[in-house]
Image (spheres, rainbow, N blue to C red):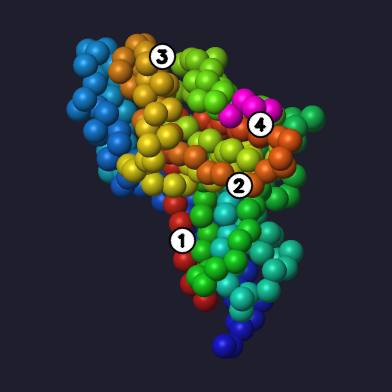
Amino acid sequence: MQVPADDEVYEALADATLRAYREAVIRLPPDVLRVIRKAAAAETNPVAHGEFANIVKNIMEAERLGVPMCQDTGVPVVYLTIPPAVPLTSGLYTSVAEGVRRATREIPLRPNVVDPLTRHNTGDNSGMGMPAIHLKPGKRFTVTVLPKGAGAENMSRIAMLLPSQKDQVEKFVVETVYLAGSRPCPPVIIGVGIGGTFDGAAALAKEALLGRVDTMTDFEEQVLCAVNRLGIGPMGLGGDFTALAVKVKTAGCHTASLPVAVNIQCWANRHATAEVER
């Protein structure tokens, strides 16, 4: 297999990052749109039903006008799948950052990313030089962008439970949503990471948000029902649907620990994948 020149790869990756970001902030994935429409049709609370109508109208207008569906265009979280023919170099990171900068100018995106201590804003969402990038090997060279708004991200939590507390996982998820209230713009989608390590559980919870939300396991359905019994409802105004879906990812953990992370996402579970065209 012929390996393309580095410059070709880097330019193609920057282009793909821009395309994925544009798609993510303007159009929701079909599975996300399906669960929103399904909940909207089933909602019995009149005020909540009206909020669902506003959400659906917002989604349709964003696509019609080709503009971001939310003013908080998020902090860029990026997943790269890299085939064997593409070497892992610092240039890949630089290219993703360039794609984010271009997306900020061209879509455009709100410049959200600042230095955590000085609060200095570069104005291009590159922050301190690099967005958060997760890597994995694969047959296809793809970039997935998951823009994460602060209202939902700020409500996320992690707990280091004891192994004897495995029956407390559902309680911790429900408690997290209860404490969040209206702040993450419900109805939310909930990513749950169980196992791994302190940092690993958080990564699992965020990656869980990339899974199809129109299909759930029995345990995910059970947690979803428990969350919806809170009655917080769309935008915190009451209703049948506080959450639209729960997605769980697990990993092996130490015999003496049980890490659990909950990553809250608003109804706009924005993410998109683009092939890197070389």
How far apart in space, not on screen, are marks 1 and 3 (Cα)? Answer: 37 Å
Mark 1 residue crowding within 10 angstroms, few (<14) / some (14–19) / many (20+): some
Residue labelled with disc 3: 230
The correct choice, above or below, for 80 with respect to 76 in the image is: below
Q: Disc 4 vs disc 1: which is toward the camera?
A: 4
Q: In the figure, residue 5 lies in which quadrant?
A: bottom right
Viewed as shown, does residue 259 lie left or right of 155? Answer: right
Give, as a single range, the part of the protein colored magenta.
162-166
Q: Amino acid at mark 1?
A: Ala
Earlier sequence position, callout 2 versus callout 3: 3
- Residue underneath mark 1: 274
Locate residue 69 relative to residue 76 in the image: left or right.
left
- Classify mark 3: helix, strand or loop: loop
Amino acid type indicated by mark 3: Leu
**Whether residue 52 is visible:** yes
Looking at the image, do the residues carrying marks 4 and 1 touch, with CB atoms under 8 Å apart? no
Vertical placement of residue 11 versus 102, above or below:
below
Mark 2 touching mark 4, by CB under 8 A? no
Q: Residue at x 61, y 76 (%)?
A: 84
Q: Considering depth in this image, is 224 or 115 the residue closer to the camera?
A: 224
Q: Residues within 10 Å of mark 4 (few under 14, many from 20)?
A: some
User: Nearest the camera: 102 or 169?
Assistant: 169
Q: Amino acid at mark 2?
A: Ala
Distance from disc 4 to disc 3, alpha carbons, whole Å, reads: 27 Å
Is there CB contact under 8 Å for labels 1 and 3?
no
Which of discs 1 and 3 lies nearer the camera? The answer is 3
> Would you call the spot at circle 3 few (<14 residues within 10 Å), some (14-19), or many (20 or more)?
some
**Location of residue 272 in the rendering, given as x and y in whole percent from the top left corner:** 44, 52
Using the numbered discs, state the Cα–Cα distance from disc 4 to disc 1 in whole angstroms: 40 Å
Q: Residue 163's mark?
A: 4
